[in-house]
């Protein structure tokens, strides 16, 4: 009689995969990954190419496939990162912990954007004739209003131009419809209206609110890391 195979111990340990938002990079998650590591939670932040939504989506798909070989995946997205995660994160557990939106089938993300974004933040974004978007200095206050100064300065120095656009076309079968999701509302956000976030959060299986700005990885890294660690424990298979 053949004994059933037993998964390797590492394959039973959850893995947190972090996806940044517009104009940022994996570097923005360092305060969170350090805290997850201290809590013995495995994690990795990835860099999106920011060249096109399709490219960003493929990057998410590849990262999830790789991470899934190491254990159950908790997929975390911030702001714009929620779009490639919705499109390519079907193997993760939570497609977005705080996102620009959780679009419904048939909804155009681009048409919803004016309802989500604060007008003051939109004035801090400059789009060139070739479609490349860059952040102006004025965007800093909207993104990091409650962030310690040293982190805000470092982030502003690392901002990236991007060609990826919020799509007019609705996403096909967004991942959150079939994968359990959680949502963190940033209650002091000056870039995306908190009420718009709460409307999206109502669609999630679990939600919390943090008294933080648009960038909780800087303004609330401790509470955010604790929430992610708690979510990760839900993925641990029974013994």
Image: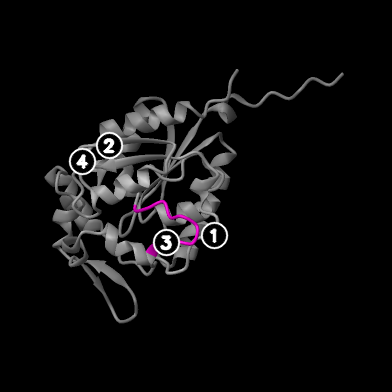
Above or below 39: residue 201? below
- Residue underneath mark 1: 172
- Residue underneath mark 4: 212
Using the image as rendered, state which of residue 154 and residue 134 is in the foreground.
Answer: 134
**Residue 65 seen in render:** yes
Task: Nearest to the eye among marks 4 and 3: give it.
Answer: 4
Circle 1 crowding by C-alpha within 10 Å: few under 14, some 14–19, many from 20: few
Mark 4 vs mark 3, CA separation in Å: 27 Å
Disc ID at residue 209: 2
For label 3, the SS is loop
Give the extent of the magenta segment: 100-109
Magenta residue check for 83: no
For label 4, the SS is loop
**Please, which residue is most extreme toward the right here?**
1
Mark 1 vs mark 4, CA separation in Å: 32 Å
User: Is 119 on the left or on the right of 5, as rendered?
Assistant: left
Disc ID at residue 49: 3
Q: Are discs 2 and 3 less than 8 Å apart at CB?
A: no
Seen at 37% across and 42% down, the residue is 202
């Amino acid at each position: 009689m053949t004994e059933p195979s037993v998964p390797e111990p590492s394959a039973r340990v959850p893995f947190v995969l972090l996806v940044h938002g517009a104009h940022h990079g994996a570097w923005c998650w360092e305060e969170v990954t350090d805290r997850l590591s201290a809590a013995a939670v495995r994690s990795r932040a990835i860099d999106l190419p920011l060249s096109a939504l399709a490219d960003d989506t493929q990057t998410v798909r590849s990262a999830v496939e790789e991470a899934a070989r190491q254990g159950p995946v908790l997929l975390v997205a911030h702001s714009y990162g929620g779009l490639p995660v919705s499109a390519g994160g079907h193997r993760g557990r939570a497609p977005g912990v705080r996102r620009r939106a959780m679009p419904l089938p048939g909804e155009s993300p681009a048409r919803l954007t004016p309802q989500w974004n604060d007008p003051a933040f939109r004035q801090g974004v400059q789009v060139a004739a070739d479609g490349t978007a860059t952040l102006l200095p004025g965007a800093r206050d909207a993104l990091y209003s409650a962030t310690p100064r040293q982190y805000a300065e470092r982030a502003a120095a690392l901002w990236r131009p991007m060609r990826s656009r919020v799509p007019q076309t609705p996403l096909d079968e967004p991942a959150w419809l079939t994968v359990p999701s959680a949502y963190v509302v940033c209650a002091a956000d000056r870039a995306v209206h908190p009420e718009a976030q709460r409307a999206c959060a109502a669609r999630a299986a679990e939600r919390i609110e943090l008294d933080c700005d648009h960038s909780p990885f800087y303004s609330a890294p401790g509470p955010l890391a604790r929430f992610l660690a708690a979510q990760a424990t839900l993925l641990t298979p029974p013994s």
